[in-house]
Image (spheres, rainbow, N blue to C red):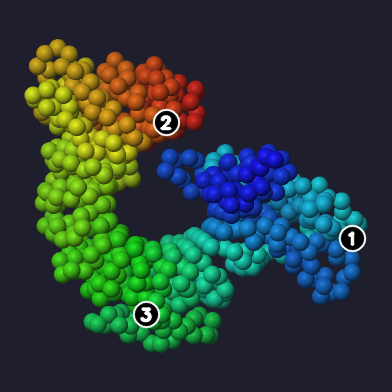
């Protein structure tokens, strides 16, 4: 007897945990046996109808199917209640709705208020205009008269785009009831909150809930109380985020929601993300000098009721809490409940806040298992508080730090402050993410190469070529090295590594010295410059380079030296055999800066080419690109604002040899690479090509 994986539930559980929704959708189409075995796993995760843009920037996928199911189910239940109240014996809708059958399978649920309202409006319009196509379930046994199939979406991270096709046998009474529902659909217009509460009643095994872009209006208080009392105690993960309107114009409900949620967390909770803001309304008083809450015990909830200010001041420990994120959108945000709640999370490993000050000191010192801190709106108080705690024996397990801030703000953080923080680390830093890496900080960071696994920094005024070489050559655990941002910010102080430092030749053998990160590096985003390019004498705008650059162009010592250097650079890159992301360029232009505009060869005003890379790799086969054929894991290549010379044969080679390639950014479509970009778009649509254009 041959067993199938569907015959062994434990094996099916293990296998499905490794499959994407795309794969699961394929599994349920095999036959009825596989459908019955795997359809429940397809319902385990129900993401928001607007798919999130993933790491490889797949386009957004709209999916209204699940919310149509929810809408239909809600209307069906409401109609049954109305019929029951009227003792209408002609109502014969099935007591087994889709949510009743599939809701218990849902484990992860993501709901976006904007999307839900939009979908709700679309479904209402659909029902009003096409009532004959709005089908409800008939009475009878669902498994006998309903064939449920799913059609998969194009991406692996989106709930199936189409949901069910039903073939039912309806009687006259059911038809009359359905028509009645259709005729009254416009009048049965539940709010988003009502729909969600209806849905959650059918999800008794829900483990993760994400509520995105919520208003937090005064009318929502009853909704949030119901969520906190009935749902939060059963959750393992909860993420709540407000929209900008709720954050910039807070009301009693907005202020009360975090404390209501915190008060109802149980030992099951492992990850909690809640919003808060320093836009404190007049009824929220500031903390006193001891960090204790000085507000009144109760505050009006906007509906004539009161909200208990002491809800967050529980004392029982939350042993399951591992990740705590106070989503901060403003500076100096420290609501009263934050530190009191933190004291209960004795096993906390990750903390995400906006800023930190002395009010947090005692609670942080009690977090003996804390490994990661992310301060996303940091100022000097944050950096100095962490330095003080580390220097005095606290946070012994902290080895992952993210300190970011807006470079345009005067936050008071100096190079010496950040260097002192890195130097105070006890066990060596594993992951470091900083806004700025200046000279002293770079020197302090190099002392942690033995443990360093990931370095991300967007502004590198003090990071020299030699610093980069030391980090790459001395970090045996390094998997991520990023000194170029992804184009979201305009950064003018970006360090680079020279080609000679990157090659790092042993003078005795004329061979490349082995680097410690060669077997581990997966992401490399940095500029490699210093290559003589006699083929590039003009700028992107056909002006002499010397006139723009104001510096002596690199000259070859002998003909062909530039290509020889490029070959050695390719050789070094080829040693990173696990490389998945290779970013040698980035788009750092500020299209709104009038002072950056110059005249081109035709006398037209164009955006200047500051920081354009000219003495860089050509990235074509003639210059030695074939050496990178060993990078079989490569998924992303970025050559933005580089003087590359990529032709059709080069992108053909890339597509053939880098079979996992999904993104190619920066082809110069206004210069010499339009044909290559056209070929890529027409022949490899699965590769997302984002060309470099100077038009806006």
Residues under labels 1 and 3: Cα distance? 57 Å
Q: Residue beneath label 3, please?
A: 284
Mark 2 and mark 1: Cα distance apart in space: 57 Å
Query: Does the residue at mark 3 contact the one at mark 2 (Cβ under 8 Å)?
Result: no
**Label 3 crowd bin: few (<14), some (14–19), many (20+), radius 10 Å:** some
Category of crowding for the residue at label 2, using alpha-carbon neighbours closer than 10 angstroms: few (below 14), some (14–19), many (at least 20):
many
Q: Nearer the viewer, residue 88 or 154?
A: 154
Instruction: Decide if residue 580 is on the left or right side of residue 360.
Output: right
User: Nearer the N terminus, badge 3 or badge 2?
Assistant: 3
Report which residue position mark 2 lands on: 661
696 lies left or right of 623: right
Mark 3 and mark 2: Cα distance apart in space: 52 Å
Pointer 1 residue: 173
SS class, disc 3: loop
Image position, residue 387 (x, y; %): 17, 64
Residue at 66% in and 47% down = 7
Indicate which label's residue lies in the foreground, 3 or 2: 2
Of the two numbered discs 2 and 1 on the same chain, state the one appearing first in sequence: 1
Please tell me whether mark 2 or mark 1 is closer to you in this view: 2
Q: Are marks 2 and 1 in contact (CB under 8 Å)?
A: no
Residue 164: percent from left, percent from top: 71, 48
Residue at left 70%, top 59%?
Answer: 101
Which residue extends farthest front? 1
Residue drawn 65% across the image and 42% down it:
4
Q: Give SS at disc 2.
A: loop
Query: Do callouts 1 and 3 mark residues in contact (Cβ within 8 Å)?
Result: no
Q: Quadrant of residue 696?
A: top left
Callout 1 crowding tier (Cα within 10 Å): few <14, some 14–19, many ≥20: some
């Amino acid at each position: 007897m041959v067993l199938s994986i569907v015959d062994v539930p434990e094996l099916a559980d293990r296998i499905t945990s490794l499959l994407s929704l795309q794969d699961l959708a394929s599994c349920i189409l095999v036959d009825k046996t596989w459908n019955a075995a795997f359809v429940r796993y397809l319902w385990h995760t129900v993401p928001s109808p607007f798919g999130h843009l993933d790491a490889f920037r797949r386009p957004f996928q709209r999916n209204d199917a699940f919310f149509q199911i929810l809408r239909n189910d809600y209307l069906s239940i409401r109609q049954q209640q109305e019929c029951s109240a009227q003792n209408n014996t002609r109502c014969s809708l099935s007591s087994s709705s889709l949510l009743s059958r599939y809701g218990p399978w849902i484990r992860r649920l993501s709901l976006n208020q904007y999307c839900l309202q939009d979908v709700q409006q679309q479904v209402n319009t659909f029902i009003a205009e096409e009532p004959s196509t709005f089908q409800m379930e008939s009475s009878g046994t669902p498994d006998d008269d309903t064939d449920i199939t799913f059609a998969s979406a194009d991406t692996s991270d989106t709930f199936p785009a189409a949901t069910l096709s039903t073939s039912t046998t309806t009687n006259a009474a059911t038809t009359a009831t359905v028509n009645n529902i259709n005729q009254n659909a416009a009048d049965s217009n539940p709010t988003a909150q009502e729909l969600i509460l209806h849905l959650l009643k059918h999800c008794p095994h829900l483990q993760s809930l994400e509520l995105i872009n919520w208003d937090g209006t005064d009318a929502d208080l009853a909704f949030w109380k119901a969520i906190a009392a009935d749902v939060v105690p059963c959750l393992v993960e909860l993420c709540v985020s407000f929209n900008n309107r709720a954050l910039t114009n807070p009301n009693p409900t907005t202020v009360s929601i975090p404390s209501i949620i915190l008060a109802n967390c149980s030992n099951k909770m492992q990850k909690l993300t809640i919003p808060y803001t320093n836009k404190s309304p007049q009824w929220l008083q500031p903390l006193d000098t001891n960090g204790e809450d000085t507000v009144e015990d109760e505050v009006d909830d906007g509906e004539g009721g009161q909200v208990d200010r002491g809800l967050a001041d529980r004392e029982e420990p939350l042993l399951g809490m591992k990740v705590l994120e106070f989503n901060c959108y403003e500076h100096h945000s420290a609501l009263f409940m934050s530190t009191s709640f933190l004291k209960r999370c004795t096993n906390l490993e990750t903390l995400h806040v906006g800023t930190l000050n002395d009010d947090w000191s005692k609670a942080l010192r009690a977090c003996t298992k804390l490994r990661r801190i992310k301060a996303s709106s940091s100022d000097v108080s944050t950096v100095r508080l962490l330095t003080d705690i580390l220097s005095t024996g606290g946070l012994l397990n902290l080895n992952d730090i993210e300190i970011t801030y807006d470079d345009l703000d005067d936050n008071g953080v100096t190079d010496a402050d950040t260097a002192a923080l890195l130097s105070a680390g006890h066990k060596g830093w594993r992951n470091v993410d900083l806004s700025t890496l200046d000279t002293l900080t770079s020197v302090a960071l190099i002392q942690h190469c033995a443990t360093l696994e990931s370095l991300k920094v967007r502004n590198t005024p003090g990071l020299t070529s030699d610093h980069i070489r030391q980090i790459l050559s001395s970090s045996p655990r390094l998997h991520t090295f990023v000194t170029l941002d992804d184009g979201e910010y305009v950064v003018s102080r970006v360090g680079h590594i020279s080609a000679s430092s990157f090659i790092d030749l042993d003078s005795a053998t004329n061979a490349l010295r082995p680097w410690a990160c060669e077997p581990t590096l997966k992401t490399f985003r940095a500029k490699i410059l210093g290559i003589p390019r006699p083929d590039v004498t003009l700028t992107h705008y056909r002006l002499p380079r010397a006139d723009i650059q104001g510096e002596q162009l690199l000259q070859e010592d002998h003909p062909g030296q530039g290509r020889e250097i490029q070959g050695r650079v390719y050789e070094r890159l080829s040693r990173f055999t696990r490389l998945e992301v290779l970013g040698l360029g980035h788009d750092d232009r500020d299209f709104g800066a009038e002072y950056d505009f110059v005249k081109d060869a035709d006398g037209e005003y164009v955006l200047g080419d500051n920081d354009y890379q000219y003495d860089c790799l050509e990235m074509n086969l003639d210059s030695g690109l074939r050496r990178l054929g060993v990078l079989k894991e490569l998924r992303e290549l970025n050559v933005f604002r580089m003087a590359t010379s990529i032709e059709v044969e080069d992108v053909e080679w890339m597509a053939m040899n880098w079979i996992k390639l999904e993104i190619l950014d920066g082809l110069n479509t206004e210069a010499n690479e339009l044909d290559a970009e056209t070929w890529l778009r027409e022949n490899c649509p699965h590769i997302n090509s984002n060309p470099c254009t100077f038009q806006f």
